[in-house]
Amino acid sequence: MRNYDTRMKTVLTFVGRFRFYLACIIGIVVSVALAGTFFAIRTRSSEDLLVISYDSTRDYFDEIGSLLRAHGTCLVDSRHGGSLDQSRAVIRGLRADAVLLATPLEIENLAAKGLIVPDWKTQFPYGSSPFSAPIVFLVRAHNPKNIVDWTDLERPDVKVSTTHPDVSGAGRLAFLALYHSAARSGTPKIPEAFCRRVYSRADCLSMGAHAAANFFATTSQGDVLLTWENEARRATGMYGTNKLTVVFPPSTILGEPVAALINNHAQERHSGRCAMQLFDLMFSVDGQRSAARNYLRPRAAQVQQEFASQFPPVAFFTVEEAFGGWSNVMKIHFSPGGTVERVIPKKRLDSLP
């Protein structure tokens, strides 16, 4: 009995020491993590801007950031991804100073959470949209399947790639363009059935337009990629016209990305001065030229004239013109139980390498 008691005391002593050491280790790890977070917050100065943007503005922000740095001391750290995922990250607590998102829907979601001003449309010129960007077709060199209009996308021999409407602004605009092209027939049932046929044969539904364009260009998967004009032209310039061709359909949807200041974060970090310098640059003539050089259609009339030869004339329609506004689009197509859920199989989201 005495030996048993001695063994039990030894075991309990060991367990107690183990718990003590484990608690110490956990405490050290937590302290280091908190210290690292505190250090990171302290070392990010008011002149270091964190800008959250949609996937296809990487090259644009590289240039805009360099221009801003040349004019002063402000630095731009831009993070990119699918526009809806980016807005959700800000809502979950990502401490961004500014955003540039693909559609007004993401901006309205931020405004509903009190992160940006309700009258965001009047905060900057052109309805706070520094440039426009239509959806086009990126096809294989010389367009071997002669894909020229939206109706060609439902042909049995055509495999479509695009981004998912639940994640990507380009994906949402591509879906709306498909829907509208069928809706012009005037029969309510036709657009949904048309979209279902196209998406049922989709080769790839990915998360971001930039990765989707690179994947399309470097593989044989898919006959046509529905994407931003600037992304299609970037890919063609990078991979060559011997591999890729940009096709402008006779009529297409016009995306109007929106810039906004995240007020609370900018106030807390005292980064408002640098953020406003960034916005002033984006809407200035120099900033508009930067957009045009990156195949984003500028707003300023002067710059439009300077780059007229770079942008083919295309018949555009906007969400307001075709659907009566983004609130209608959200209610009918992108809300739970909406058209997208009925058309695209659930959990269909392809991860690209």
Image: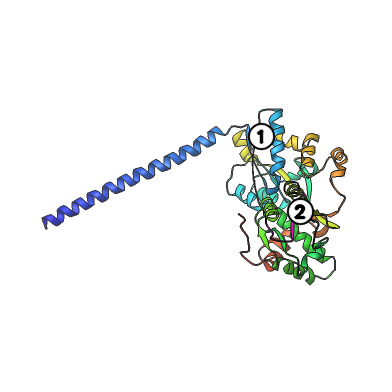
Residue sitting at x 71%, y 28%: 71
Rendered image: mark on residue 349: none
Residue under label 2, please give it.
Answer: 244
> Residue 239, percent across and down?
72, 49
Residue 223: % across, % down: 74, 61
Q: Which of 322 and 109 is in front in this view?
A: 322
Q: What stretch is highlighted in magenta?
A: 219-229
- 284 up-or-down from 343: above or below: above
Residue 297 location (% of width, % of height): 81, 45
What element does badge 2 sit on?
Answer: strand
Residue 254 position (above or below residue 184): above
- Residue type of the residue flagged with mark 2: Leu
- Look at mark 1 in the image and give the residue it sits on: 272
Residue 119 visible here: no
In primary-sequence order, the first of circles 2 and 1 is: 2
Crowding at mark 2 (Cα within 10 Å: few <14, some 14-19, many 20+): many
Q: In which quarter of the image is residue 141?
A: bottom right
User: Residue furthest toward the top?
Assistant: 72
- Side of 186 where 339 appears, left or right: left
Q: Quadrant of the C terminus?
A: bottom right
Q: Which residue lies furthest to the left in this view?
A: 2
Separation of residues labelled 2 and 1 (CA atoms): 42 Å
> Is 238 or 101 nearer to us in this picture?
238
Check if residue 77 falls in the magenta segment: no
Residue 154, image x and y in percent?
77, 67
Q: Classify residue 96 by image quadrant.
A: top right
> Looking at the rendering, in which quadrant would you find the N terminus?
bottom left
Mark 1 neighbour class, 10 Å CA radius: few under 14, some 14 to 19, many 20 or more? many
Along the line of sight, which residue is nearer the eye, 255 or 155? 155
